Amino acid sequence: MPALEQFLGTSAGLSAATITRLTVQWQDEARAFNGRDLSAADYVYVWADGVHLNVRLDEAKLCLLVVVGVRVDGRKELIALAEGYRESAGSWADLLRDCKRRGMRAPVLAVGDGALGFWNALREVFPETREQRCWFHKIGNVLAALPKSAHPGAKKALAEIWNAEDRDHARRAVAAFKLAYGAKFGKAVAKVVDDLDELLAFYDFPAEHWVHLRTTNPIESTFATVRHRTKVTKGPGSKAAGLAMAFKLIEAAQQRWRAVNAPHLVALVRAGARFERGKLVERPAAEPVTSTATAA
């Protein structure tokens, strides 16, 4: 996307008139994207996060509420992008209600940081959706409650939990973590124990999907690029322009996103199949076939 590269300072400069025209065009495209019909898309998994970007002028730092989903065929796709407050349940509820109004079905599982206002909003709008806390954020929170000298051992102990071969082994690793750190660092241990069901929810899904469901990496990795770009250009100029720029960058990145592992299993998850230790143990019951006799 040459125009985007130039706009972001990686090529020859653009005229002020061209920048203005592109900004208006991208804002229009972002508005159209956020108003599109979602009834034909079926998102089985979703990741949610609030991402802060620097903007210049006198406006406050821009926070983007981002929702990325996995369609029933296994493809990843941006669902929604809006300005809001990361910790605000109201901001997230507005976004989710709008998605539902436009035809979005309840996802089977949502993944995000525990600090998000997203969870209260999710329980209101899509109460049937299960919750998975992001391990990347959780590890950061746990380490923040520990002295630096304890970080190497704690990281290894936490990896024994999130990288366990199944839920039973993970629970045993939690017990070991509690035994090792509970006496001196109760607050750090509580950050794991208090959220344990939501931290281990991914174990109820196909093992091939665990690597995707443990963290919000699809958003984190994409926005590392967005943050870098906005930093290079000293902020995109305004909140509306910043949202438009982020939309165009994600749109470009999305073309390189890979489908989840074993994409054929996503449809089974949507259909209600049961998995134990990551393996399929019960397919969804087939719809009963009924027939009616008709007189000849």
Image (cartoon, grey):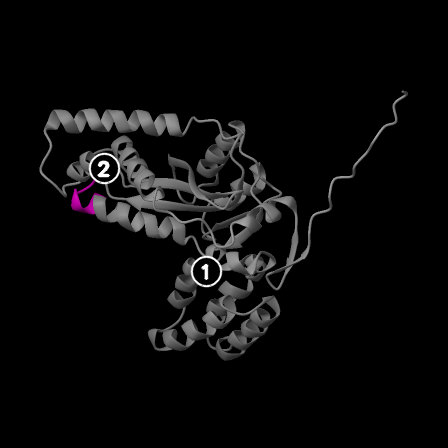
Q: What is the secondary structure assignment of the residue under circle 2? A: loop
The answer to whether 48 appears left or right of 243 in the picture is right
Report the residue at 40% width, 29% height from top.
34
**Image quadrant of residue 11?**
top left
Q: Residue at x 20, y 41 (%)?
A: 235
Indicate the amino acid at tag 2.
Met
Q: Is residue 232 magenta?
A: yes
Looking at the image, is 241 positioned above or below residue 200? above
Residue annotated with mark 2: 1
Tell me the residue at 90%/21% (across/down). 295
Range of magenta residues: 230-235
**Position above or below: 13 against 114:** above
- To which residue does mark 1 refer? 135
Q: Position of residue 185 (x, y in %)?
A: 46, 73
- Left or right of 224: which side holds 97? right
Q: Amino acid at mark 1?
A: Trp
| Residue 281 drawn at (x, y percent) | 68, 58
Q: Tell me: 153 left or right of 56.
A: right
124 or 188: which is nearer to us?
124
Q: Residues within 10 Å of mark 2 (few under 14, many from 20)?
A: few
* Picture coordinates of residue 242, whole percent (x, y): 26, 36
